[in-house]
Image (cartoon, rainbow, N blue to C red):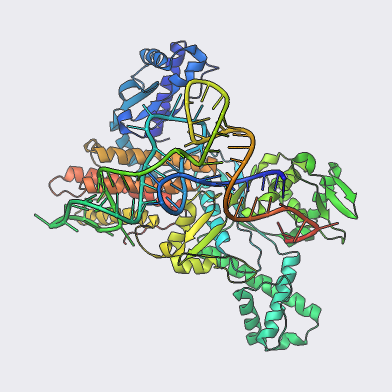
Amino acid sequence: MNIAEQVQTKLKEAIKEAVIKANLATEENIPMCLLETPRDKAHGDYSTNMAMQLARIAKKAPRAIAEELIANFDQSKASIEKLEIAGPGFINFYMNNSYLTELIPTIINAGEKYGETTIGNHQKVQVEFVSANPTGDLHLGHARGAAVGDSLCNILDKAGYDVSREYYINDAGNQINNLALSVDARYFQALGTDKPMPEDGYHGQDIIGIGKRLAEEFGDKFAALSDEERFDTFREYGLKYEMEKLKQDLENFRVRFDVWYSETSLYNNGKIDQALKALRDNGHIYEEDGATWLRTTPMGDDKDRVLIKQDGSYTYLTPDIAYHKDKLERGFEKLINIWGADHHGYIPRMKAAIEALGYERDALEVEIIQLVHLYKDGEKMKMSKRTGKAVTMRELVEEVGLDAVRYFFAMRSADTHLDFDLDLAVSQSNENPVYYAQYAHARISSILRQGAEQGLVAGDAADYSLIGAEKEVELLKKLGEFPQAIAEAAQKRIPHRITNYIYDLASAFHSFYNAEKVLDPENKQKTQARLALIKSVQITLRNALALIGVSAPEKM
RNA sequence: GUCCCAGUAGCUCAGCAGGAUAGAGCGACAGCCUCCUAAGCUGUAGGUCGUGAGUUCGAAUCUCGCCUGGGACGCCA
């Protein structure tokens, strides 16, 4: 807990004590103490609405309650300069903010660890994201999912959760067969033979590329094979090719997974049978119309779901249930799945399945990534795997730049539709907020370099009592908020809370930069102290950017 | 028909564990570089928070209805 958090905790305690001392509520029915930072500086550094909340319990006017609270308030608890009643019954606290300078050495000592909190309490969390079928290039939606998922994992990790990142490979079932058939068609086409694509084939450029590569490398060698042999060969080749490409693309997107989990493995190691048995033993399975059904309706689903089709094969749901059973058996207390919006209807049945397996349905949490629409030249572009005309993640990164893409996706709440204006993102103008934050970091780096040239190194012993100008105090307050921003982002699963923080911090720095000069040859003491201040801003900014996978450049 | 997401300034969006005069960027307008990076800063203008009711001391925030836009509702994956 840093000094700013400690002070807030003390304040809250002092407020509670005052409530009890004034006999306004008992230990049991005291409302949760809410301490907030007023938007308007004139309303002090902190304020509480405790008096208003007590109005119902104590049956008195809020302002009268506030009077009593103040009378019973122990001001020596925290560095309070004055406090007053305002508006409908707020109590505003004006702090002596000198304690805030303690943040500077705290942050410098913590370095890249600054921002860590323990609210996660080592809860074992597994986050499954992207999990795109290995049948083509990752497109915009996947890119958004990858950016949000990875950022969320970074945040959870920083907040003290034990996070595991996982990618579920759909390497069984129809889509892989279609992949093999598509490769087959492209192979023959590359050889100059006209062979039609399968009905549900994948028309992406990459599959055309595979066909060409096969034709170039092996000539017509495969044409001689039996259809069956060729199918198996192409199936395996296509899968391997697609997976390698996926991994590389994600790596280039600064996303790494701890586990790549194969759907096929569930077939091979009996996990599907075990899951079916568990569901049967728990009495949730019945046979009808020649199919095997899971009774999900009692657990909040619209209708029951087929597990084994008439033809004896599994539906998509069946191995997925086995997969989730396996996740839970691996000891994860919380499963967070990041799904595209087109899968949202799938949530009730998966939660029902988890309940049917005998687990808490809320062990599964699904974060929905809404659609991305790309606009270019004011025109909306379609993203469809079918037509193969979709803009891929790779193309997007090449065109816009990785930092901008990652920032842009992390910036908006994930469950709302996103219009991605390509022209805007491409133009390296100040409309792109990522530059705003990176620029702050580069500016700091530049000043630190120049300080070092003068023999002044940030972090060397300095007199922090020289820090206290208005802009400096605002900057310090922002710095102190970082751990709470992370805690909130983690608990609410909202990475965009971090980009908001980044923006605020960068803004506080730019504002400070324009108001005060860091390097002052006339005043070495002050220079030394301010170098340490901006050093702590640099550390915090870099840590925050790292959470969303954006680089922190030394120069721009 | 059922379900999900959205509707807040001209545009793109924050705010939604109910709190003070609803914020930011872009765009518009007016200022700031003999000075550490002007990709910056400072200020002005701009809003019936889709709509109607309800809950209460208080609603952009919670509940219900309605309107508009987008999406999902397979023995596909």
Can you say which quadrant of the picture contains the C terminus of chain A?
bottom left
Residue A109: image location, x then y, percent:
36, 44
In this view, the residue farthest toward the top is A23
Residue situated in front as seen by the camera: A532 or A248: A248
Q: What residue lies at 51% left-to-right and 69% top-to-bottom?
A: A395
Residue situated in front as seen by the camera: B51 or A140: B51
User: Considering only vertical position in the picture, is A11 above or below A210?
Assistant: above
Residue A423: image location, x then y, percent:
43, 65
Q: What residue lies at 74% left-to-right and 72% top-to-bottom?
A: A199
Can you say which quadrant of the picture contains the N terminus of chain A?
top left
Asked whether residue A419 is in view, the answer is: yes
Residue situated in front as seen by the camera: A183 or A463: A183
Q: Is residue A70 left or right of residue A313?
A: left
Residue situated in front as seen by the camera: A200 or A97: A200
Asked whether residue A146 is in view, the answer is: no
Residue A467: image location, x then y, percent:
24, 38
